[in-house]
Image (tube, rainbow, N blue to C red):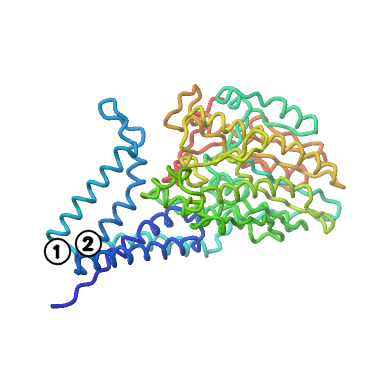
Amino acid sequence: MKRPLFLHPFLLAIYPVLAMLSHNLDQIPLAEAIRPLALSLLLALVLFGLGFAFLRNALSAALLASLFLVLISSYGHVYGLAEGMRLGGVLIGRHRFLAPLWGGLLLVGTLAVLRWGRRAYSLNTALNAVAVVLCLFPSLSMLSFARRASDDMLPVSTPVAPVETTSASLPSVYYIILDGYARQDILSEVFSFDNQPFLEGLQARGFQIAERSRSNYPNTALSLASSLNMDYLETLAGPFDPQSRDLAPLFNLIQHNRVQQAFHEMGYATVAFASGYRGTELRTADRYLAPEVESTRAQSLFGDLTPFEGMLVQTSAGLLLTESNAALPPRFRLDLEAPYLAHRKRIEFALEQIPQVDRTQGPEFVFAHLVVPHPPFVFGPHGEELQHTAAFSLSDASYRGDYQGYLQAYTDQVIFLNGRLETMLGELLASSPTPPIILLQSDHGSGASGLSSAHGSVPYLEERFSNFIAVYAPACPGLRLDPTATPVNLFRLILRDCYGLPYELLPNRSYFSNYVRPYALREITPELSR
């Protein structure tokens, strides 16, 4: 009889890593999957080896290892689905119910393997086939993403040739994205926060503010791909496949954007800051600035968890460890804070370094995407460090608190950011030999109304599309910012009124899609009444 292959424990071990990676390629470099893949294979090998040592049968050991791995990898997913669910008035989405249920499944499965496992060759063959198919789908998805990401998907048209000018006399341009920063009326009505003193301070410095601004799209990749190319996405690279979730085309539009090209042709050098979000890391800039993040790996047996590893822990039985992390001896705790600290460091670094960008070599186009006040919440109102019990993620959906907690944490980050922006702008204006052009803009509004526990009075679409726009351009006395401006027109306005380029403003329109199907866009302009 031909010796059977026991592939399924090892394939089922790496499948959660491959699946998570394929769904987060917009945020996670491939290299971050190496360690979890290696540890997953090691876990499968240990489980198989222990099973064989006790049972002295390879088939039973393989089936038992696969049972363990399936239960381990599915626990966090099931907990996430059950969290908040009630049965007969009892909250069942809790570890006190789910953990014993998983223990019971493990016991029943183990007894079944002990009784029938030695003869289950057909089951072994079926599990091998299922595991191969499972791993094939995310692998193909990653190959497709890698192929698309390698293509130079430049915008279909190029900027109008700039007018001749002496670059030494040109102002530096600062494009600062405040991720998820809400408009004043939303901050007042949803968050009960009066942002007027900050806005009046901006106006006193010479900023124009679009009081009724709206975003063109509901998330970062869509919004910045549009605003950095001064056009709507269907014009730039459409038609898109509405069923696709591959963000590589949007990332390529951001990396090879018209705005940067236009300033380059006028003699500008590009300076970009690390954001922590893969799509906006402009590493091809003339200068790419990132902080040195100190590792705490030596302080813990398990070392730093990367954001990707944190997501894997959060969706597996490792969730039990994160929930009880504080109760463990310090040396055995998972270091959940390392990614949060790195996130803080990137934001603080950009706010500190933007005024210090060297302008002696000529004008600069400075791009800084600050992922704040958008979750994750890492700053108290005075910059205090916050502690976390959940794995790090840049997703809105990663927030695990209630609605009131979101409102308070978001407001605290707005207060922190306002104070740091005031300091940064003061230093920047004081150190600039030529008055700069500064664009403060949020890619979209806040997302409190999208929480399952939300009970606010503002519809989600109104909140999400009520973004923030402020422009400082003293060198352009004829520039007038429309109160209803949208990001797609910001650089059209700047290049037309400050540089004399023949750009026309586009109609202000807004399109909605969800994260699962980002290209299934529908126009919602008539639905936005604010």
The residue that label 1 is drawn on is 120
378, above or below 167, in the image: above
Give neighbour class at mark 2: few <14, some 14-19, many 20+ (Cα, 10 Å).
Answer: many
Residue 179, horizontal then vertical, whole percent: 60, 41
Q: What residue is at 45 percent from the left and 24 percent from the top?
A: 455
The image position of residue 443, as x and y in percent, is: 59, 41
Tell me the quarter of the image containing the C terminus: top right
Question: Pointers 1 and 2 in contact (CB under 8 A)?
Answer: yes
Q: Which residue is mark 2?
A: 63
Q: Quick one: 46 or 120, which is closer to the camera?
A: 46
Q: Identify which amino acid the numbered label 2 is placed on.
A: Leu
State the SS at label 2: helix
Q: Position of residue 283 (x, y in %)?
A: 64, 60
Q: Residues within 10 Å of mark 1 (few under 14, many from 20)?
A: few
- For the residue pair 474 and 378, the one nearer the viewer reads as 378
Residue name at image x 47 percent, y 42 percent? 398
> Going from the N terminus, do you reach mark 1 or mark 2 first?
2
Q: How many marks?
A: 2
Q: Quadrant of residue 94?
A: top left
Considering only vertical position in the picture, is 167 above or below 87? below
